[in-house]
Image: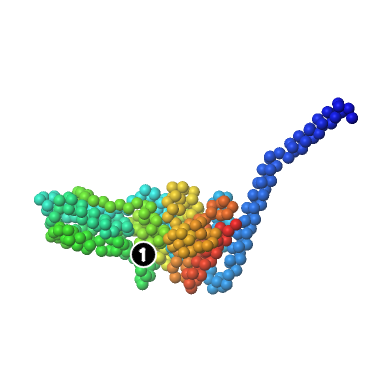
Amino acid sequence: MSIKKIFLFSILCLMTLNIAAQDYDENDTIITAWQDSSNDEAAWEDKIIDRINGLLQSKIFKTSTVGLEIYDLTDNKVLYAYNEQQTMRPASTQKMLTAVTALARLGGNHEFKTQLLYTGEINNGTLNGSLYCVGGFDPAFGNEDLERFVSAVRTAGIDTILGNICADLQFKDGDRMGEGWCWDDDNPTLTPLMLNKKDDFMSCFASLLRQKGVVINGYTEEQKTPSSAQQICVVTNNMDRILHRMMKNSDNTYAEAMFYQLGSSAKKAKIHFNNIIKEVGLNPKNYYVADGSGLSLYNYVSPHEEVLFLKYAYDNKEIFSHLYASMPIAGVDGTLEKRMRGTHAEGNVHAKTGTVTGVSSLAGYLDAPNGHFVCFSIINMGIRQASTGRNFQDQLCDALCRP
């Protein structure tokens, strides 16, 4: 073969290799990877469906019922739903609805406030007037805060009070029991002026004043604060402090305090709940809000409603940042501290728990193994033991978090 022919043959081979390389370019690799990812995602969703279908075969559902909805917030679609439209009692997952509503209407910078004011003149240590304690339904007001009030009185130069010690309870109506509460339950105190979550603020305040050498010539009474009154002390607690205890510890008093920040009566507070229900696309007439804590037998929600509230919060980042940080974490803290340990859900699931007689519930968020963010609601009803519902919920959460 001549040198010229060898050269032409070499050129032809190189051109052939170049064409082959162009036919198998990086785009093919991307397409193949995308197809594999899509297949993996579909396979994971199939696994989820199979796992939940299997859990629903449990014998516990011969005598009880469950409603649930799993929603993929990343893909904006329902992953699984079962009895999701059924109205059920939420138990303490009602607190999640309360938190979302309060954050939406009041904002994350809202403060719970208790004020101390006086009327009249202070002459030579004597107050020719009265003290007014104005309640703002702050459930965190404690002994140290009461000490601050007494110190403020002494700092103002008062050692004798000729008038009265007055409680201003205008912040809330006079109802002391929530709608649908059982009389034999350990119900929270519904007063806007409380000390350590109890209704003994005024007696303790007067007693501490006397202990510190302040003479009180008058008596304690309930009275509206005059517009001419001057403030000498104010104690505030921020939204996150109240929210964390309400959610992490499922504190009923804190939840009712949050509820009544929305309105001076349950009727007024409910308006805000119903408006959010409308905003998420549902009809408020299909649900019922009785209180903020979930203690009431009259509360009725659906798993679908709870999922829409969770989605509403997720879509509003200012709400979500406060809500998510307040939720118990599986196997880590709050009411989920001892649950889901040793499972794929541990440290992953952030959710509000709920338990009343015959009901166990769980609603919150988790990171799925495919990298998607998911919200869910599970309500077990008709169970004799709360542990029955909790075990089902824990298994379901593990199924969602498992690859």
Depth check: give the residue in front, 228 or 373.
373
* Front position in the image: 179 or 12: 12
Does residue 84 appear left or right of residue 172 in this picture?
right
- Type of colouring: rainbow
Q: In this view, does 124 lie above or below 62?
A: above
Looking at the picture, does residue 69 appear above or below residue 1?
Answer: below
The amino acid pointed to by label 1 is: Gly
Please tell me which residue is depicted at 19% across the width and 62% down the height of the picture: 207
Q: Can residue 106 be seen in this view?
A: yes
Disc 1 target residue: 178
- Tell which residue pokes out farthest to the top in this image: 4
Q: Which residue is drawn at 20% across and 60% down?
A: 208
Residue 220 appearing in the image: no
Residue that appears at 40% across and 66% down = 296
Horizontal side of 327 relative to 62 (left or right) equals left
Measured as percent of width and height from the top left, residue 109 is found at 37, 48
Please name the residue shown 36% across and 59% down the image. Answer: 254
Outermost residue toward the left?
124
Q: Provide the secondary structure element on which disc 1 rests.
A: loop
Q: In which quarter of the image is residue 149?
A: bottom left
Outermost right residue: 1
Q: Identify the image quadrant of the C terminus.
A: bottom right
Picture quarter with the N terminus: top right
